[in-house]
Amino acid sequence: MQLSHPFIPLLHELGNMSRETVLRQLHHETAEDRSRTTGHAGSDVIYAIDREVEEQLVRMLEQVADDFGGIVLVAEGIGEDEITSYPANRDRSACRWRLLVDPIDGTRGIMMDKRSAWFLAGVAPNRGDDTRLSHVECACMTELPTSRAAVADSFVAVRGKGVQAIRHDLIRGGEGVPIGITPYTGSSIRGGFAQVCRFFTPGKLEAAQLEEALFDSLFPDAGEGEILGFEDQYISTGGQLVELLTGRDRFTADLRATLYMSILFKDRRIGHVCHPYDLAGMLVAEEAGVVLTDASGAPLDAPFDTRAAVDWVGYANTKIRREVEQTLLSLLETHHWSQTQD
């Protein structure tokens, strides 16, 4: 199956540029060089490894945006208000498309050469400030691998048309070969990789308690010594979605925003949360068959911006959702996560 959308070649080109740039830095710069702080955007830190990719992204958009009828780029750390239009002299309202990008999702892992990061992008018709993730027509997720990797994967999706997955040989080069992807098809998270995200303090204790209560509630018949589940705290939303769409993970819940807004965090410092750009590639997971919701069980959606706090829950399939969702939502009430601050 060959997907068709005018943005597919450009998204592939942008992803390939990001991968090549990151690999070049990994091979020729020290970790200290890559992790040099160059600025701040919102609550996040911008590092040297981010900046080089961002600069190349802007140059590429400047060259091609007019061919697409104008592009409004929404990306953390790029532009005064993180929204810029290309060509530069075109008013935002006159641009045909909006492009939401996270050039490196998982910066801290890749800049220390620990684990793959991901280039994420989603493109939607320009509806101004009313543009949302649910309007994305075409999206991509491109792996930014470590210096030790022999292959790297990329995924592109078109709404209602499915997903294409390609594996690139980093040793021999070439165009890459198609690969099949299938989310987990079973009916239970028992014994598989399934987790509530707890990357950073504060909030690790509360998230761990919620996860343990979830497994205890779902499997009260667990035997002595039985391992009910494994976890993978992959510090990249794109990476987490890839684990779901490739069948390696069965369930993931990132509920940090709900936790920080709850009564549990009244008069406490709040931590870092997921933002819409972290979910720029979510259409890929959806088209692969992954079920994505918000913290209330509604279909996942968010503004097309860099600042909104977003919670998401991912189920490998509808059977997993039926097993987990109602228990999870009940536990959010029991543990006071759903009780908001006055």
Image (spheres, helix red, strand yellow):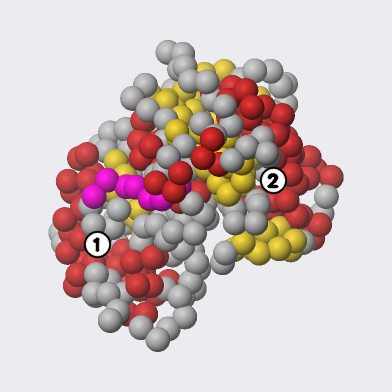
Q: Is residue 325 above or below residue 171?
A: below
Q: Picture quarter containing residue 48?
A: bottom right
Q: Horizontally, is 73 left or right of 47 in the view?
A: left
Residue under label 1, please give it.
Answer: 214
C-alpha span from label 1 to label 2: 40 Å
Residue under label 2, please give it.
Answer: 54
Of residues 265 and 10, the one nearer the viewer is: 10
The residue at 64%/18% (across/down) is: 175
x then y, percent, for residue 222: 20, 59
Give SS at disc 1: helix
Of residues 292 and 197, the one nearer the viewer is: 292
Regarding residue 13, the answer to whether it shows in the image is no
x then y, percent, for residue 328: 22, 59
The residue at 57%/64% (across/down) is: 42
Disc 2 marks a residue whose amino acid type is Glu
Q: Horizontally, is 192 left or right of 32 in the view?
A: left
Give SS at disc 2: helix
x then y, percent, for residue 70: 58, 32
The residue at 38%/65% (across/down) is: 257
Where are the magenta residues, as a range? 298-304
From the image, state whether disc 1 or disc 2 is nearer to you.
2
Assign the magenta stretch its main secondary structure.
Answer: loop
Of residues 123 and 13, the one nearer the viewer is: 123
Q: Is residue 241 above or below residue 71?
A: below
Residue 62: say if magenta: no
The residue at 44%/48% (across/down) is: 129
